[in-house]
Amino acid sequence: MKKNVYVHTFGCQMNVYDSDRMTAMLAGYGYSPIDRAEQADLIIVNTCSIREKAAQKAFSQLGRYRKLKIQNPKLIIAMGGCIAQQEAEEVFKRAPYLDLVFGTQNINRLPEFIRVLEETGGRIANVTPEAAYLASLDEPLAPSSSSVSAFVTIMQGCDNYCSFCVVPYLRGREASRKKASIVREIREMVARGVREVTLLGQNVNSYGRKEGAASFRDLLEEIAAIEGLRRIRFTTSHPRDLSDEVIELFGSMGELCRHIHLPVQSGSDRILSLMNRGYRLEDYLALIAKLRAASPEISITSDMIVGFPGEEDQDFSATLDLMDRVRFDGLFSFKYSERQGTAAVALPGKVGERIKGDRLRTLQSLQERHTWEKNRSWEGRLVEVLVERVSENNSEDLTGRTSTNRVVNFKGDPELIGSLVDVLIIRAYLHSLRGEISDDFVKSPDAALRCIPCHCGVPKSTPHSS
Ligand code: 5AD
Ligand code: SF4
Protein backbone atom coordinates (compact mmCIF):
# COMPACT_ATOMS: atom_id res chain seq x y z
CA MET A 1 0.00 0.00 0.00
CA LYS A 2 1.25 3.48 -0.89
CA LYS A 3 2.26 5.50 2.16
CA ASN A 4 3.05 9.17 2.56
CA VAL A 5 5.53 11.00 4.74
CA TYR A 6 5.44 14.69 5.63
CA VAL A 7 8.59 16.19 7.14
CA HIS A 8 8.41 19.53 8.94
CA THR A 9 11.86 21.07 9.34
CA PHE A 10 12.82 23.68 11.90
CA GLY A 11 16.17 25.41 12.27
CA CYS A 12 19.33 25.36 10.28
CA GLN A 13 20.40 24.14 6.85
CA MET A 14 21.92 21.11 8.52
CA ASN A 15 18.40 20.10 9.47
CA VAL A 16 17.22 20.67 5.89
CA TYR A 17 19.89 18.25 4.69
CA ASP A 18 19.01 15.74 7.42
CA SER A 19 15.33 15.97 6.46
CA ASP A 20 16.25 15.30 2.83
CA ARG A 21 18.13 12.20 3.89
CA MET A 22 15.20 11.03 6.02
CA THR A 23 12.88 11.41 3.05
CA ALA A 24 15.29 9.61 0.72
CA MET A 25 15.77 6.76 3.20
CA LEU A 26 12.05 6.35 3.70
CA ALA A 27 11.49 6.37 -0.07
CA GLY A 28 13.48 3.12 -0.09
CA TYR A 29 10.96 1.83 2.46
CA GLY A 30 7.89 2.76 0.42
CA TYR A 31 7.07 6.24 1.73
CA SER A 32 6.52 9.07 -0.76
CA PRO A 33 7.21 12.62 0.39
CA ILE A 34 4.21 14.98 0.34
CA ASP A 35 3.80 18.62 1.23
CA ARG A 36 0.47 18.40 3.08
CA ALA A 37 0.44 16.99 6.58
CA GLU A 38 -3.28 16.15 6.29
CA GLN A 39 -2.57 13.29 3.85
CA ALA A 40 0.37 11.81 5.72
CA ASP A 41 0.71 8.33 7.24
CA LEU A 42 3.89 9.48 8.94
CA ILE A 43 4.76 12.99 10.16
CA ILE A 44 8.31 13.77 11.20
CA VAL A 45 9.07 16.99 13.03
CA ASN A 46 12.78 17.73 12.69
CA THR A 47 13.48 20.10 15.56
CA CYS A 48 16.01 22.74 16.52
CA SER A 49 16.88 23.77 20.07
CA ILE A 50 19.52 26.40 19.48
CA ARG A 51 17.29 29.04 21.10
CA GLU A 52 14.24 28.72 23.31
CA LYS A 53 11.97 30.27 20.68
CA ALA A 54 12.83 27.61 18.10
CA ALA A 55 12.03 24.90 20.63
CA GLN A 56 8.66 26.46 21.52
CA LYS A 57 7.66 26.65 17.86
CA ALA A 58 8.30 22.94 17.37
CA PHE A 59 6.09 22.01 20.32
CA SER A 60 3.23 24.24 19.24
CA GLN A 61 3.41 22.71 15.76
CA LEU A 62 3.33 19.22 17.27
CA GLY A 63 0.17 20.21 19.10
CA ARG A 64 -1.47 20.89 15.72
CA TYR A 65 -0.41 17.49 14.35
CA ARG A 66 -1.95 15.86 17.37
CA LYS A 67 -5.38 16.86 16.04
CA LEU A 68 -4.66 14.88 12.86
CA LYS A 69 -3.91 11.85 14.97
CA ILE A 70 -7.30 12.12 16.62
CA GLN A 71 -8.87 11.88 13.14
CA ASN A 72 -6.48 9.11 12.02
CA PRO A 73 -5.24 6.98 14.95
CA LYS A 74 -2.90 5.05 12.64
CA LEU A 75 -0.90 8.18 11.91
CA ILE A 76 2.68 7.87 13.19
CA ILE A 77 4.17 11.07 14.62
CA ALA A 78 7.93 11.21 15.09
CA MET A 79 10.28 13.81 16.47
CA GLY A 80 13.93 14.07 15.42
CA GLY A 81 16.62 16.75 15.60
CA CYS A 82 18.16 18.60 18.50
CA ILE A 83 15.20 18.79 20.92
CA ALA A 84 14.70 15.06 20.54
CA GLN A 85 18.41 14.52 21.21
CA GLN A 86 18.38 16.80 24.23
CA GLU A 87 15.19 15.77 25.96
CA ALA A 88 14.81 12.16 24.82
CA GLU A 89 12.06 10.48 26.84
CA GLU A 90 11.13 13.77 28.49
CA VAL A 91 9.38 14.79 25.26
CA PHE A 92 7.15 11.71 25.55
CA LYS A 93 5.82 13.20 28.76
CA ARG A 94 5.31 16.60 27.22
CA ALA A 95 3.78 15.20 24.00
CA PRO A 96 2.19 11.84 24.91
CA TYR A 97 0.83 11.33 21.38
CA LEU A 98 4.36 11.02 19.94
CA ASP A 99 5.23 7.52 18.67
CA LEU A 100 8.93 7.97 18.02
CA VAL A 101 11.74 10.13 19.31
CA PHE A 102 15.08 9.69 17.54
CA GLY A 103 18.38 11.55 17.88
CA THR A 104 20.60 13.48 15.51
CA GLN A 105 22.91 10.50 15.11
CA ASN A 106 20.27 7.78 14.66
CA ILE A 107 18.81 8.97 11.38
CA ASN A 108 20.31 5.94 9.66
CA ARG A 109 17.95 3.71 11.70
CA LEU A 110 14.77 5.59 10.85
CA PRO A 111 13.29 2.97 8.44
CA GLU A 112 13.93 0.27 11.04
CA PHE A 113 12.16 2.27 13.77
CA ILE A 114 9.19 2.88 11.48
CA ARG A 115 8.97 -0.81 10.56
CA VAL A 116 8.85 -1.80 14.25
CA LEU A 117 6.14 0.78 14.94
CA GLU A 118 4.08 -0.41 11.97
CA GLU A 119 4.41 -4.06 12.92
CA THR A 120 4.15 -3.98 16.68
CA GLY A 121 2.92 -0.52 17.60
CA GLY A 122 4.13 0.94 20.89
CA ARG A 123 6.56 3.80 21.23
CA ILE A 124 10.28 4.14 20.62
CA ALA A 125 12.75 6.61 22.11
CA ASN A 126 16.29 6.12 20.84
CA VAL A 127 18.79 8.96 20.98
CA THR A 128 21.98 7.02 21.66
CA PRO A 129 24.54 8.15 19.05
CA GLU A 130 25.27 5.42 16.53
CA ALA A 131 28.89 4.73 15.62
CA ALA A 132 27.59 3.82 12.15
CA TYR A 133 25.94 7.19 11.61
CA LEU A 134 28.87 9.04 10.00
CA ALA A 135 29.56 6.11 7.68
CA SER A 136 25.87 6.05 6.73
CA LEU A 137 26.29 9.52 5.20
CA ASP A 138 28.55 7.88 2.62
CA GLU A 139 25.84 5.53 1.41
CA PRO A 140 24.24 6.75 -1.79
CA LEU A 141 20.51 7.38 -1.48
CA ALA A 142 17.83 7.72 -4.10
CA PRO A 143 17.42 11.41 -5.00
CA SER A 144 14.63 13.02 -3.05
CA SER A 145 14.49 16.36 -4.80
CA SER A 146 15.41 17.72 -8.17
CA SER A 147 16.36 21.25 -7.28
CA VAL A 148 19.00 23.41 -8.91
CA SER A 149 20.69 24.11 -5.59
CA ALA A 150 21.37 21.45 -2.96
CA PHE A 151 22.96 21.06 0.46
CA VAL A 152 25.70 18.55 1.23
CA THR A 153 26.86 17.83 4.76
CA ILE A 154 30.64 17.49 4.78
CA MET A 155 31.11 17.14 8.52
CA GLN A 156 29.08 16.68 11.65
CA GLY A 157 29.33 17.88 15.21
CA CYS A 158 31.37 20.69 16.70
CA ASP A 159 34.34 20.83 19.08
CA ASN A 160 34.32 24.58 19.65
CA TYR A 161 32.22 24.82 22.77
CA CYS A 162 31.25 28.45 22.46
CA SER A 163 29.94 29.09 25.95
CA PHE A 164 26.38 29.94 24.79
CA CYS A 165 25.90 27.06 22.39
CA VAL A 166 24.23 23.72 22.86
CA VAL A 167 25.30 22.24 19.52
CA PRO A 168 28.43 20.36 20.68
CA TYR A 169 26.30 18.55 23.27
CA LEU A 170 23.59 17.60 20.78
CA ARG A 171 25.43 16.95 17.56
CA GLY A 172 28.48 15.27 19.06
CA ARG A 173 32.17 15.68 18.41
CA GLU A 174 33.42 17.05 15.13
CA ALA A 175 33.95 14.41 12.43
CA SER A 176 34.48 14.87 8.70
CA ARG A 177 33.15 12.73 5.88
CA LYS A 178 35.57 11.24 3.40
CA LYS A 179 36.42 13.47 0.47
CA ALA A 180 35.79 10.74 -2.09
CA SER A 181 32.30 10.13 -0.78
CA ILE A 182 31.40 13.85 -0.79
CA VAL A 183 32.67 14.23 -4.34
CA ARG A 184 30.73 11.16 -5.48
CA GLU A 185 27.54 12.48 -3.90
CA ILE A 186 27.94 15.83 -5.65
CA ARG A 187 28.66 14.14 -9.01
CA GLU A 188 25.40 12.22 -8.65
CA MET A 189 23.55 15.43 -7.79
CA VAL A 190 24.96 17.18 -10.84
CA ALA A 191 23.91 14.26 -13.02
CA ARG A 192 20.30 14.88 -11.99
CA GLY A 193 20.38 18.63 -12.54
CA VAL A 194 21.92 20.25 -9.48
CA ARG A 195 24.09 23.23 -10.50
CA GLU A 196 24.98 24.69 -7.10
CA VAL A 197 25.98 23.00 -3.86
CA THR A 198 26.25 24.45 -0.37
CA LEU A 199 28.70 22.51 1.77
CA LEU A 200 27.49 22.26 5.34
CA GLY A 201 29.20 21.89 8.67
CA GLN A 202 29.29 23.75 11.97
CA ASN A 203 32.86 24.77 11.19
CA VAL A 204 33.70 23.87 7.61
CA ASN A 205 37.14 25.46 7.74
CA SER A 206 38.36 22.70 9.99
CA TYR A 207 37.20 20.04 7.50
CA GLY A 208 39.56 17.03 7.59
CA ARG A 209 41.70 18.55 10.36
CA LYS A 210 41.20 15.69 12.81
CA GLU A 211 41.41 12.99 10.19
CA GLY A 212 44.51 14.58 8.60
CA ALA A 213 43.47 13.28 5.19
CA ALA A 214 42.49 16.39 3.23
CA SER A 215 42.17 20.11 3.87
CA PHE A 216 39.08 22.18 3.17
CA ARG A 217 40.92 23.81 0.27
CA ASP A 218 41.71 20.35 -1.23
CA LEU A 219 38.03 19.51 -0.97
CA LEU A 220 36.94 22.75 -2.62
CA GLU A 221 39.40 22.25 -5.48
CA GLU A 222 38.21 18.75 -6.15
CA ILE A 223 34.55 19.78 -6.09
CA ALA A 224 35.24 22.74 -8.40
CA ALA A 225 36.61 20.30 -10.98
CA ILE A 226 33.28 18.43 -11.23
CA GLU A 227 31.97 19.01 -14.70
CA GLY A 228 28.57 20.66 -14.89
CA LEU A 229 28.70 22.13 -11.38
CA ARG A 230 28.56 25.90 -11.69
CA ARG A 231 28.64 27.17 -8.13
CA ILE A 232 29.94 26.24 -4.70
CA ARG A 233 28.92 27.81 -1.40
CA PHE A 234 29.78 26.80 2.14
CA THR A 235 28.59 27.53 5.63
CA THR A 236 29.45 28.02 8.46
CA SER A 237 32.96 29.41 8.80
CA HIS A 238 34.50 30.03 12.19
CA PRO A 239 36.74 33.13 12.21
CA ARG A 240 39.40 31.27 14.19
CA ASP A 241 39.82 28.61 11.51
CA LEU A 242 39.40 30.55 8.28
CA SER A 243 42.75 30.08 6.56
CA ASP A 244 44.58 32.31 4.07
CA GLU A 245 44.58 29.47 1.55
CA VAL A 246 40.78 29.40 1.56
CA ILE A 247 40.50 33.23 1.53
CA GLU A 248 42.67 33.30 -1.63
CA LEU A 249 40.15 31.10 -3.44
CA PHE A 250 37.61 33.94 -3.30
CA GLY A 251 39.90 35.76 -5.72
CA SER A 252 40.79 32.86 -7.96
CA MET A 253 38.18 30.10 -8.04
CA GLY A 254 35.45 30.91 -10.53
CA GLU A 255 32.98 28.40 -9.11
CA LEU A 256 33.26 29.70 -5.54
CA CYS A 257 30.46 32.16 -4.82
CA ARG A 258 31.53 35.57 -3.59
CA HIS A 259 29.79 35.28 -0.24
CA ILE A 260 30.96 34.24 3.19
CA HIS A 261 28.93 33.81 6.34
CA LEU A 262 31.39 34.60 9.12
CA PRO A 263 29.65 34.77 12.51
CA VAL A 264 31.29 37.27 14.85
CA GLN A 265 28.70 37.23 17.71
CA SER A 266 29.92 40.44 19.40
CA GLY A 267 32.13 43.46 18.84
CA SER A 268 33.50 43.49 22.40
CA ASP A 269 36.72 41.63 23.20
CA ARG A 270 35.55 41.08 26.76
CA ILE A 271 32.33 39.40 25.61
CA LEU A 272 34.13 37.43 22.88
CA SER A 273 36.40 36.02 25.54
CA LEU A 274 33.45 35.09 27.80
CA MET A 275 31.87 33.46 24.78
CA ASN A 276 35.03 31.37 24.28
CA ARG A 277 35.21 32.37 20.62
CA GLY A 278 39.02 32.22 20.41
CA TYR A 279 39.61 35.50 18.52
CA ARG A 280 39.71 39.21 19.22
CA LEU A 281 38.03 42.01 17.35
CA GLU A 282 41.27 42.95 15.56
CA ASP A 283 41.66 39.35 14.30
CA TYR A 284 38.16 39.49 12.87
CA LEU A 285 38.74 42.85 11.19
CA ALA A 286 42.00 41.53 9.71
CA LEU A 287 40.05 38.64 8.14
CA ILE A 288 37.53 41.06 6.65
CA ALA A 289 40.38 43.09 5.13
CA LYS A 290 41.94 39.97 3.62
CA LEU A 291 38.60 38.78 2.22
CA ARG A 292 37.97 42.16 0.60
CA ALA A 293 41.52 42.24 -0.77
CA ALA A 294 40.92 38.83 -2.38
CA SER A 295 37.50 39.83 -3.73
CA PRO A 296 36.45 43.50 -3.38
CA GLU A 297 32.77 42.66 -3.98
CA ILE A 298 32.52 39.74 -1.63
CA SER A 299 29.32 39.74 0.38
CA ILE A 300 29.90 39.27 4.10
CA THR A 301 27.13 38.18 6.45
CA SER A 302 27.33 37.36 10.13
CA ASP A 303 25.55 36.29 13.31
CA MET A 304 25.30 38.54 16.35
CA ILE A 305 24.02 37.90 19.87
CA VAL A 306 22.78 40.69 22.13
CA GLY A 307 22.33 40.47 25.87
CA PHE A 308 24.97 37.84 26.55
CA PRO A 309 25.64 37.66 30.34
CA GLY A 310 27.78 40.59 31.43
CA GLU A 311 27.10 42.65 28.29
CA GLU A 312 27.21 46.32 29.37
CA ASP A 313 26.22 49.38 27.35
CA GLN A 314 29.82 49.90 26.22
CA ASP A 315 30.05 46.28 24.98
CA PHE A 316 26.90 46.78 22.97
CA SER A 317 28.29 50.07 21.59
CA ALA A 318 31.39 48.14 20.50
CA THR A 319 29.11 45.79 18.57
CA LEU A 320 27.41 48.70 16.79
CA ASP A 321 30.82 50.17 16.09
CA LEU A 322 31.98 46.90 14.53
CA MET A 323 28.89 46.90 12.31
CA ASP A 324 29.68 50.44 11.16
CA ARG A 325 33.24 49.45 10.35
CA VAL A 326 32.43 46.22 8.49
CA ARG A 327 29.07 47.14 6.97
CA PHE A 328 27.74 43.62 6.69
CA ASP A 329 25.63 42.73 3.69
CA GLY A 330 23.26 40.89 6.01
CA LEU A 331 23.08 39.92 9.65
CA PHE A 332 21.23 37.30 11.68
CA SER A 333 20.79 38.73 15.15
CA PHE A 334 19.49 37.04 18.25
CA LYS A 335 18.69 37.77 21.86
CA TYR A 336 20.85 35.57 24.05
CA SER A 337 18.86 32.53 25.07
CA GLU A 338 20.08 30.50 28.02
CA ARG A 339 20.54 26.82 27.15
CA GLN A 340 20.82 24.21 29.88
CA GLY A 341 24.14 22.43 30.00
CA THR A 342 26.16 25.26 28.43
CA ALA A 343 28.99 27.08 30.24
CA ALA A 344 27.29 30.50 29.99
CA VAL A 345 24.52 29.37 32.37
CA ALA A 346 26.99 29.89 35.25
CA LEU A 347 28.03 33.41 34.20
CA PRO A 348 27.00 36.40 36.31
CA GLY A 349 25.38 39.56 34.97
CA LYS A 350 22.24 38.25 33.30
CA VAL A 351 20.71 40.91 31.03
CA GLY A 352 16.98 41.60 31.36
CA GLU A 353 14.54 40.84 28.54
CA ARG A 354 13.62 44.51 28.07
CA ILE A 355 17.24 45.56 27.56
CA LYS A 356 17.81 42.64 25.21
CA GLY A 357 14.76 43.69 23.19
CA ASP A 358 15.90 47.34 23.03
CA ARG A 359 19.39 46.35 21.93
CA LEU A 360 18.08 43.97 19.31
CA ARG A 361 15.84 46.66 17.81
CA THR A 362 18.69 49.20 17.72
CA LEU A 363 21.00 46.70 16.09
CA GLN A 364 18.43 45.58 13.55
CA SER A 365 17.57 49.09 12.45
CA LEU A 366 21.26 49.88 11.92
CA GLN A 367 21.62 46.68 9.91
CA GLU A 368 18.55 47.53 7.83
CA ARG A 369 20.28 50.75 6.83
CA HIS A 370 23.42 48.90 5.87
CA THR A 371 21.59 46.17 3.94
CA TRP A 372 19.53 48.77 2.14
CA GLU A 373 22.63 50.79 1.16
CA LYS A 374 24.39 47.65 -0.03
CA ASN A 375 21.42 46.45 -2.07
CA ARG A 376 20.93 49.86 -3.66
CA SER A 377 24.54 49.86 -4.81
CA TRP A 378 23.56 47.03 -7.18
CA GLU A 379 20.94 49.08 -9.04
CA GLY A 380 21.93 49.60 -12.67
CA ARG A 381 24.45 46.77 -12.64
CA LEU A 382 24.57 43.58 -14.65
CA VAL A 383 24.77 40.47 -12.47
CA GLU A 384 25.01 36.78 -13.15
CA VAL A 385 22.07 34.89 -11.68
CA LEU A 386 21.60 31.15 -11.30
CA VAL A 387 17.90 30.61 -11.99
CA GLU A 388 16.42 28.37 -9.31
CA ARG A 389 12.66 28.27 -9.79
CA VAL A 390 9.43 30.01 -10.68
CA SER A 391 8.73 32.60 -7.98
CA GLU A 392 6.31 31.53 -5.24
CA ASN A 393 4.76 35.02 -5.24
CA ASN A 394 4.24 35.53 -8.95
CA SER A 395 4.06 32.72 -11.47
CA GLU A 396 5.39 34.97 -14.24
CA ASP A 397 8.59 35.63 -12.34
CA LEU A 398 11.70 33.55 -12.04
CA THR A 399 13.80 33.59 -8.90
CA GLY A 400 17.51 33.06 -8.60
CA ARG A 401 20.52 34.28 -6.69
CA THR A 402 23.64 36.23 -7.48
CA SER A 403 27.05 34.89 -6.57
CA THR A 404 26.88 37.31 -3.60
CA ASN A 405 23.72 35.49 -2.44
CA ARG A 406 21.17 38.18 -3.24
CA VAL A 407 17.75 37.02 -4.37
CA VAL A 408 16.81 38.39 -7.80
CA ASN A 409 13.30 38.24 -9.29
CA PHE A 410 12.74 38.85 -12.99
CA LYS A 411 10.40 37.88 -15.81
CA GLY A 412 11.57 34.95 -17.86
CA ASP A 413 10.89 31.60 -19.45
CA PRO A 414 10.84 28.69 -16.94
CA GLU A 415 13.10 26.88 -19.37
CA LEU A 416 15.86 29.01 -17.94
CA ILE A 417 15.73 27.18 -14.61
CA GLY A 418 19.18 25.72 -14.01
CA SER A 419 20.91 28.27 -16.24
CA LEU A 420 23.18 31.18 -15.45
CA VAL A 421 21.73 34.35 -16.94
CA ASP A 422 22.89 37.94 -17.02
CA VAL A 423 20.32 40.18 -15.35
CA LEU A 424 20.23 43.96 -15.17
CA ILE A 425 19.23 45.12 -11.68
CA ILE A 426 16.53 47.77 -11.99
CA ARG A 427 15.33 48.08 -8.40
CA ALA A 428 16.63 47.18 -4.96
CA TYR A 429 14.47 46.13 -2.01
CA LEU A 430 15.49 45.18 1.49
CA HIS A 431 15.31 41.43 0.92
CA SER A 432 15.62 41.09 -2.84
CA LEU A 433 16.47 42.76 -6.12
CA ARG A 434 14.27 43.28 -9.17
CA GLY A 435 15.91 42.62 -12.51
CA GLU A 436 15.42 42.30 -16.25
CA ILE A 437 17.18 39.84 -18.45
CA SER A 438 19.81 42.04 -20.00
CA ASP A 439 19.94 40.62 -23.50
CA ASP A 440 18.68 37.65 -25.43
CA PHE A 441 21.24 35.17 -24.29
CA VAL A 442 21.84 32.82 -21.43
CA LYS A 443 24.66 30.54 -20.47
CA SER A 444 23.24 27.06 -20.63
CA PRO A 445 23.82 24.55 -17.80
CA ASP A 446 26.28 22.77 -20.07
CA ALA A 447 28.52 25.79 -20.26
CA ALA A 448 27.68 26.49 -23.88
CA LEU A 449 25.88 29.74 -24.61
CA ARG A 450 22.55 29.68 -26.27
CA CYS A 451 20.07 32.10 -27.61
CA ILE A 452 16.77 32.31 -25.76
CA PRO A 453 14.31 33.51 -28.38
CA CYS A 454 14.94 30.80 -30.92
CA HIS A 455 16.87 28.23 -28.85
CA CYS A 456 19.12 27.85 -31.85
CA GLY A 457 22.36 27.36 -29.96
CA VAL A 458 24.17 30.18 -31.74
CA PRO A 459 26.96 31.41 -29.48
CA LYS A 460 26.34 34.67 -27.65
CA SER A 461 29.31 36.30 -29.34
CA THR A 462 27.73 35.76 -32.76
CA PRO A 463 24.98 38.32 -33.47
CA HIS A 464 22.18 36.84 -35.58
CA SER A 465 18.47 37.18 -36.06
CA SER A 466 16.10 34.38 -35.22
N1 5AD B 1 21.35 32.27 22.26
C1 5AD B 1 21.26 33.11 21.20
N2 5AD B 1 21.79 32.84 20.01
C2 5AD B 1 22.45 31.69 19.87
N3 5AD B 1 23.10 31.15 18.81
C3 5AD B 1 23.59 29.95 19.16
N4 5AD B 1 23.29 29.69 20.44
C4 5AD B 1 22.59 30.76 20.92
C5 5AD B 1 22.02 31.10 22.16
N5 5AD B 1 22.11 30.28 23.21
C6 5AD B 1 23.21 31.84 17.53
C7 5AD B 1 24.66 32.16 17.20
C8 5AD B 1 25.01 31.17 16.14
C9 5AD B 1 23.67 31.00 15.45
C10 5AD B 1 23.54 29.78 14.61
O1 5AD B 1 22.74 30.97 16.50
O2 5AD B 1 24.72 33.49 16.72
O3 5AD B 1 26.02 31.62 15.26
FE1 SF4 C 1 27.92 26.44 18.44
FE2 SF4 C 1 30.25 27.71 18.45
FE3 SF4 C 1 30.08 25.21 17.41
FE4 SF4 C 1 28.93 27.30 16.11
S1 SF4 C 1 31.14 27.01 16.50
S2 SF4 C 1 28.01 25.27 16.53
S3 SF4 C 1 28.24 28.59 17.81
S4 SF4 C 1 29.78 25.79 19.55
Image (cartoon, rainbow, N blue to C red):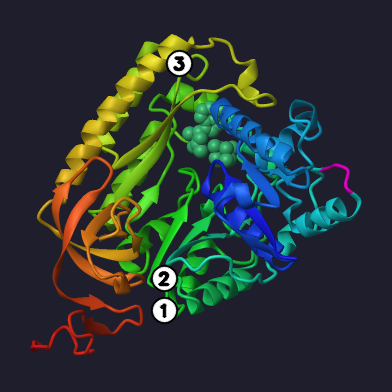
Q: Which residue is mark 1?
A: 228
Q: Earlier in the sequence, mark 3 or mark 2?
A: 2
Mark 3–mark 2 Cα distance, whole angstroms, equals 43 Å
Q: Which residue is mark 3?
A: 311
Mark 1–mark 3 Cα distance, whole angstroms, equals 48 Å
Any mark on residue 195, and which?
2
Q: Is 123 a magenta residue?
A: yes
Going by the numbered disc 3, the residue's amino acid type is: Glu
Task: Look at 72% across and 59% down and name the residue there.
Answer: 134
Q: Is residue 4 left or right of residue 205?
A: right
Mark 1–mark 2 Cα distance, whole angstroms, equals 7 Å
Taking depth in this image into account, of 290 and 181 the one nearest to the observer is 181
Specify the quarter for ligand 2. Answer: top right
Does residue 429 sit above or below 398 in this rendering? above
Which quadrant holds the N terminus? Answer: bottom right
Residue range in magenta is 121-125
Query: Residue 264 appears in which quarter of the rendering?
Result: top left
Which quadrant holds the C terminus? Answer: bottom left
